[in-house]
Amino acid sequence: MIAATIDDNYERIKDDLVSRGLTYDRLIDDVLDHVCCMVEEFMSHGNDFETSYDQVLETIDEKSLPEIQHQTLLNLDKKFQQMKNFTYVFGLTSAIVTIVGSLFKKMHWPGAGILITVGMMLIVFVFLPLYFITNHKEQVERKNPVYAIVGYLTIALLLVGAVFKIMHWPGAGKMIYASIGFMLIGFVPLYVVNAFQRSGKEKANLPYIVMLLVGIAIVMLFSNINMSKDLLDIYVDEALANEGRVEVAQERTFSLLELALDSSRMDQQATISKIHDQARDLQVMITGMQEGMIAYVDQPGASIEEVNGKDNRSAGRDAILDNGAGVAFITEAKKYAAMLDELVKDPVANAQIEDHLEFTTLVWDWEHGRDGVRDSPLMKNYYKNTDAAKGIALAEYVAIAYLLHN
Amino acid sequence: MIANDLLKGTLRTIVLKLLADNGRMYGYEITKKVEELSTGKIKLTFGALYPVLHKLEADGHISIEVEYIGKRVRKYYTLTETGRSWTDQKVDEFFDFVTTLTYVLKPTPA
């Protein structure tokens, strides 16, 4: 009885399934039999055909049939499966290469640049395209390739920008900004729209919110890098300015010294030489520390503007504290300050000198001492040293000028 | 109810094992059997089942016999020889996995 009723409605059920998106014959057979069995079961509880069939149809989500068919066909598509496997293999390989490269970079071992570049190129040009293509193919409604393309461009630019940044190649900043732009005007709105469209049907809000937060986090991370880059640039500018002032002060001191040789103030000659020698010794110590830090990041002889690794946090510890004259420098600088204080009696000149040598007093003592140097980036330590050098040179000039005119 | 994401990787093993124990089965029968054996905790939808069955067939692990029930076609699935040995392997792998998980997840007595 039941079987006969179902047989009568066979064509209708089949048409319904086809109109809901089933087109693959072999799957139609399976689903058709399945649905008929479900109807039979409902009918065996005493319902009539229409009620039973309606109830069965209700359990089948509108989109589920095309989805099942799509999944089935993909499962059978050997090429697609191979592509998926390739994606995983390449993803794994490139991630490992990049991670190893980053570790090499941290350890200052040779080959880091090549590893990072190769790893990132694999990610950007092999893994990501494969990933987005396979992912896109797995979507049932593949209406919008824009979505995959914008996603790809955002991530690809971000990663290439990061490599350029690490390798100190020009254009890194622009790429990162472009990628942030893509994210803000492309990726994020698409994601939000998509999330809203889906949220009605699935309870899949959390992944999207998390994805959004991750996006925001990345944007903030990169804006941070740019901020600290600006800060480094400020330090470079200030350090160069200080070095310029040291030169000017030393030239002026030099002309004072020539004047002193000609003048009748021969009685001051010994004292002036003492000051000059002590100042020169301190400057030599500073130059040694500066060159040591630059050598520590593997670019001996480079000028500070060209140095890679301005943010290196162990250069100062190595070249100033452990293997440099940092500790002796503080002691000698204090002696120098005490000596000038002793020799210069004029309160105005004395105040000027004290001002120039402020770094030898408590606050600066800490800044130049163990704690201040140990965890500061190279550029900050370099800048502090130029500040000290400037103070020493100016104090020298003031002291010698005072001695010559009194 | 057992969460879908937990089931995902084991669905293939479940299907293979059922076919090994029951000989030939058709799709609806498989879902019913799973529901019965799991005392209703696992509800296999046909959406999850048929992609797996078709894949297993394409890989040569199961074969199909067709019968007509009135007008409609019923496909009975049976393990092939390779499917049979593969099933043993998959079931062993699964128990291995469960044992390992138990080690990891069970708190050790103090």
Image (cartoon, coloured by chain):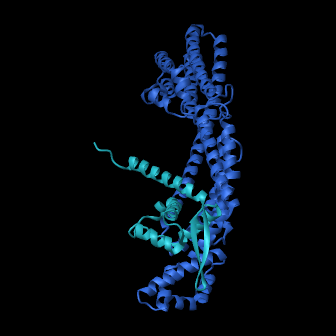
Q: Assign the C terminus of chain A to one quadrant of the image.
A: top right
Question: What residue is rendered at 54% in x and 73% in y?
Answer: B26
| Image position of A120 (left or right of B70) | right
Give how far across and how far down residue B60 sits, in percent: 64, 61
Q: Which of these two is toward me, A192 or A335?
A: A192
Q: Which of these two is toward me, A296 or A279?
A: A296
Give how far across and how far down residue A222 sits, in percent: 58, 50
Give how far across and how far down residue A398 sits, in percent: 56, 23
The vertical placement of A100 against A343, above or below, is below
Tell how many labels.
0
Instruction: Specify whether residue A58 is in view.
Output: no
Which chain: blue? A
Q: Which of these two is toward me, A90 or A375?
A: A90
Q: In which quarter of the image is residue A82?
A: bottom right
| Image position of A56 (left or right of A67) | left
Q: Quadrant of residue A142?
A: bottom right
Q: Quadrant of residue B84?
A: bottom right
Q: Which of these two is toward me, A132 or A361?
A: A132
The vertical placement of A141 against A406, above or below, is below
The vertical placement of B61 against A254, above or below, is below
Instruction: Specify whether residue B88 is in view.
Output: yes
Question: What residue is rendered at 61% in x and 69% in y?
Answer: B64
Q: Colour of chain B?
A: cyan
Give how far across and how far down residue A294 sits, in percent: 63, 28
